[in-house]
Amino acid sequence: MRIVDVHKRFGGREVLRGIDMTVRRGEVVCLLGPSGGGKSTLLRCINHLERIDRGEIWVDGQPIGYRLRGGALHELHEREVAAQRRIIGMVFQRFNLFAHRTALENILEGPVNVLGIPRAAAMERGRQFLARVGLADWANNYPAELSGGQQQRVAIARALAMEPKLILFDEPTSALDPELVGEVLDVMRALAKEGMTMIVVTHEVGFAREVGDHAVFMFDGRIAEAGSPEQVFGNPRHDRTRQFLAKVL
């Protein structure tokens, strides 16, 4: 995945100010930094939930939200963008599950309606993905009957069911009670070991240190610092990075 000189503005406020990033297949990149620094906006731009004002985003060799024709990028129709999103999974802070559907039914939505997989086959696959996140026995429970950690694991299984090339995690543990954080991070650790390409917005410095291949510190819409977790956490070069780490460590 390549991000090239990406800019995004909301009204008079420039939220992203020229972001450049490369993520290789199988890598885990952790985005850290204070609130309002542009991390979540960057994720939403990667899957074209937000339209960028300038720059390019490429995933699996194709420009997201655009088609390259005659040496220029032309914006795609929403139906074409939706088809592109099939290769980009997204796990939100607040789970975004359908309250009136069971855990299994939440997972079936994409494979049946987007990928066109027959319902019986999708149900079998859905059960396999629930087992993969440790919820084989909870397939018929509704979100209200699940803990926050279980709901987030269903959301991860839902993303996996689309067989994405890349999964984006937008602060996946920040809405959870402290005792539930570990069960979600354990699933993410397992995905990293399996070679899933992941971009994770997180304040879980321990997770970023242990699992991340790269740590990226964002501040005021820019990448202030990027490198290995050992370098960024152990010997940060930027004053703003040092100030942030002094508060969270």
Image: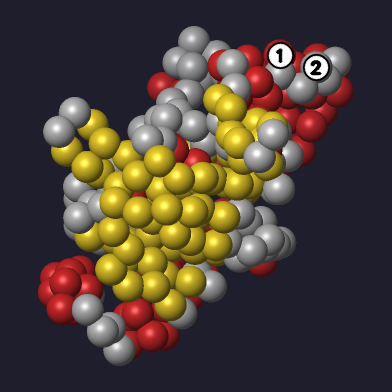
Image position, residue 121 (x, y; %)? 86, 23
Secondary structure of residue under mark 2: loop
Q: Quadrant of the image for the N terminus? A: bottom right
Between 181 and 82, the one lying in front of the other is 82
Residue at the (38%, 85%) spot, across then down: 231
Image position, residue 211 (x, y; %)? 52, 70
How far is mark 2 from mark 1, CA to CA? 6 Å
Q: Is residue 62 above or below residue 18?
A: above
Q: Amino acid at mark 2?
A: Gly
Image position, residue 192 (x, y; %)? 62, 62
Instruction: Identify the image quadrant of residue 120.
Output: top right
Q: Is residue 198 above or below residue 71?
A: below
Q: Amino acid at mark 1?
A: Asn
Seen in the image, is 89 located left or right of residue 230? right
Residue at the (29%, 51%) spot, across then down: 17
Between 35 and 202, the one lying in front of the other is 35
For label 1, the residue is 113
Tell which residue pokes out farthest to the bottom in this image: 235
Neighbour tally class for label 1: few under 14, some 14-19, many 20 plus, Cα within 10 Å: few
Seen in the image, is 176 located left or right of residue 49? left
Neighbour tally class for label 2: few under 14, some 14-19, many 20 plus, Cα within 10 Å: few
Image position, residue 48 (x, y; %)? 49, 32
For label 2, the residue is 116
Tell which residue pokes out farthest to the top in this image: 100
Between 36 and 64, the one lying in front of the other is 64
Residue at the (53%, 73%) spot, across then down: 213
Residue at the (19%, 28%) spot, across then down: 11
Secondary structure of residue under mark 1: helix
